[in-house]
Image: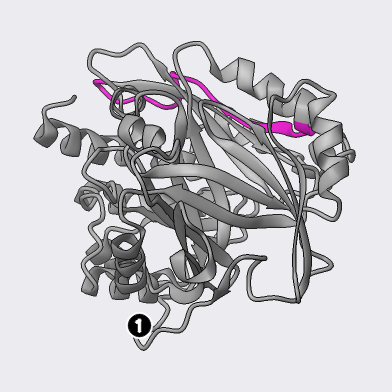
């Protein structure tokens, strides 16, 4: 890891102390995808990622125009939503973007106040505060737009005791493969267009009270062929982290440009999900057919002990096992982390997942950027999009 990258990771607590508290966030409530076939997508995430059946909304529950399947694994909830007729506006999103993330829902104590505080600071409204009720209580939701057509939904559920929220029922299924050990959403990365990163950094600072606690430029994140720039935004308690990427000039087309071309605009690039045992998790996911990026070269793993020694950390896992699975290792002053990235989970080379295990480190694998991007470029070359 370069000294420049280390320097921006210094004194995170001091930075967080400066975060405004007008928008207290308790965590990620759910992530909603708009997809072409929610039933089949749900089967994929259950089979390959170990999610469990949780809740359902559709014709059987009185929903005449959309169907939604809710999947759960530990603290992670995915909502997969499909329109039931050609006239529904969700179709426009799917035609333009393909399957992708529409809603990043944030768990709050007070959805009305969250909406009021963000819209008065300049957020564009997606949904005014709405109370949904049934025999189990009420859920209050309100939404604002962020980059592209992506939405942040504020979800207040302190007065609700049902399975997910009103209009949903418990989803009973005989098919529930074992979980693979995924625990919670660690962070979610957004890709924005040329020159837009700082605009959205300022938006998160001004509208949501976030702070920029890590920054990487094209001198730090580059290969022989491509480059990008990234800034990591976090709320005050550090539970919500949104890195924002934009392309940078390079000899060839970067992964960010490829995403923007195929997604046809800004959107969520990847979801990082945490595990306590990445070896077990990745081994199981590989058995279930999940495809990961190619394994870094031998010289990458030869350099790992030196990178750890720089911070006086000792690797607890067997490096040969990590190498055999293609798991990457990085370190900072506070510890190390283990991470691996799936290939895109759809035919368009857009959305993918990161599996991450933090052993004290609070960074984002900056020391792995070069190896990671070279792996992505190998896949781009196969697709003819580099």
| Residue 278 point in image, percent of width and height | 42, 69
The answer to whether residue 161 is left or right of residue 346 is: right
Q: Position of residue 35 (x, y in %)?
A: 36, 49
Whether residue 290 is situated above or below residue 103 in the rendered picture: below
Identify the residue at horizontal 38%, vertical 32% (top origin): 92
> Where's residue 207, x and y in %?
77, 27
Q: Counting other residues with Cα less than 10 Å from the Cα at mark 1, is it few (<14), some (14-19), or many (20 or more)?
A: some
The kind of secondary structure the magenta stretch mainly shows is: loop
Q: Is residue 163 above or below residue 37?
A: below
Q: Nearer the viewer, residue 173 or 287?
A: 173
- The residue that appears at 20% across and 48% down in the rendered structure is 297
- Establish if 338 lies above or below 174: above
Identify the image's colour scheme: rainbow, by chain, secondary structure or one colour. one colour
The answer to whether residue 291 is left or right of residue 384 is right
Q: Element under label 1?
A: loop
Give the residue number, with chain letter if any, for mark 1: 177
Give 174 or 121, whichever is nearer the viewer.
174
Which quarter of the figure is the C terminus placed in? top left
Looking at the image, which is closer to me, 192 or 90?
A: 90
Q: Tell me if residue 156 is in the magenta stretch.
A: no
For the magenta stretch, what is the residue range? 208-225
Instruction: Give residue 162's quadrant in the image.
Output: bottom right
Q: Is residue 216 magenta?
A: yes
Decide: is 344 above or below 286.
above
* Residue 307 visible here: no
**Can residue 215 be seen by looking at this rendering?**
yes
Position of residue 55 measured from the top left corner of the image (x, y, whole percent): 53, 72
The residue at 36%/26% (across/down) is 256
336 or 41: nearer the eye? 41
Does 381 sit left or right of 255 as displayed?
left
């Amino acid at each position: 890891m370069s000294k420049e990258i280390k320097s921006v990771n210094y004194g995170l607590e001091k930075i967080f102390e400066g975060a405004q508290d007008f928008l207290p966030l308790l965590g990620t409530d759910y992530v909603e995808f708009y997809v072409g076939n929610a039933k089949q997508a749900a089967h994929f995430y259950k089979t390959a990622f170990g999610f469990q059946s949780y809740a359902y909304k559709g014709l059987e529950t009185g929903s005449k125009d959309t169907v939604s399947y809710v999947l759960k694994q530990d603290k992670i909830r995915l909502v997969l939503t499909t329109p039931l007729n050609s006239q529904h506006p969700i179709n426009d999103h799917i035609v333009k973007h393909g399957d992708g993330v529409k809603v990043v829902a944030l768990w709050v104590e007070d959805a009305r106040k969250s909406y009021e505080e963000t819209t008065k600071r300049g957020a564009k409204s997606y949904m005014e505060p709405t109370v949904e009720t049934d025999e189990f209580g009420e859920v209050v939701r309100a939404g604002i737009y962020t980059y592209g057509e992506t939405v942040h939904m504020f979800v207040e559920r302190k007065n609700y005791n049902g399975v997910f929220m009103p209009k949903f029922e418990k989803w009973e299924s005989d098919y529930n493969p074992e979980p693979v050990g995924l625990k919670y959403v660690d962070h979610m990365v957004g890709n924005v267009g040329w020159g837009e990163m700082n605009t959205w950094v300022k938006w998160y600072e001004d509208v949501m009270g976030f702070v920029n606690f890590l920054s990487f430029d094209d001198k730090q994140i580059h290969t022989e062929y491509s480059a990008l720039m990234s800034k990591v935004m976090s709320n005050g308690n550090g539970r919500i982290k949104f890195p924002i990427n934009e392309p940078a000039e390079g000899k060839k087309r970067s992964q960010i440009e490829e995403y923007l071309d195929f997604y046809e605009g800004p959107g969520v690039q990847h979801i990082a999900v945490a595990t306590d045992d990445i070896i077990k998790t990745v081994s199981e996911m590989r058995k279930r057919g999940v495809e990961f990026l190619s394994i870094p070269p031998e010289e990458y793993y030869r350099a790992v002990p030196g990178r750890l020694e720089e911070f006086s950390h000792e690797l607890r896992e067997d490096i040969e096992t990590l190498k055999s699975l293609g798991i990457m290792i990085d370190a900072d002053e506070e510890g190390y982390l283990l991470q691996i990235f799936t290939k895109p989970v759809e035919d368009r080379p857009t959305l993918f997942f990161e599996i991450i295990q933090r052993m004290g480190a609070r960074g984002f694998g900056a020391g792995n950027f070069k190896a990671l991007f070279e792996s992505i470029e190998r896949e781009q070359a196969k697709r003819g999009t580099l």
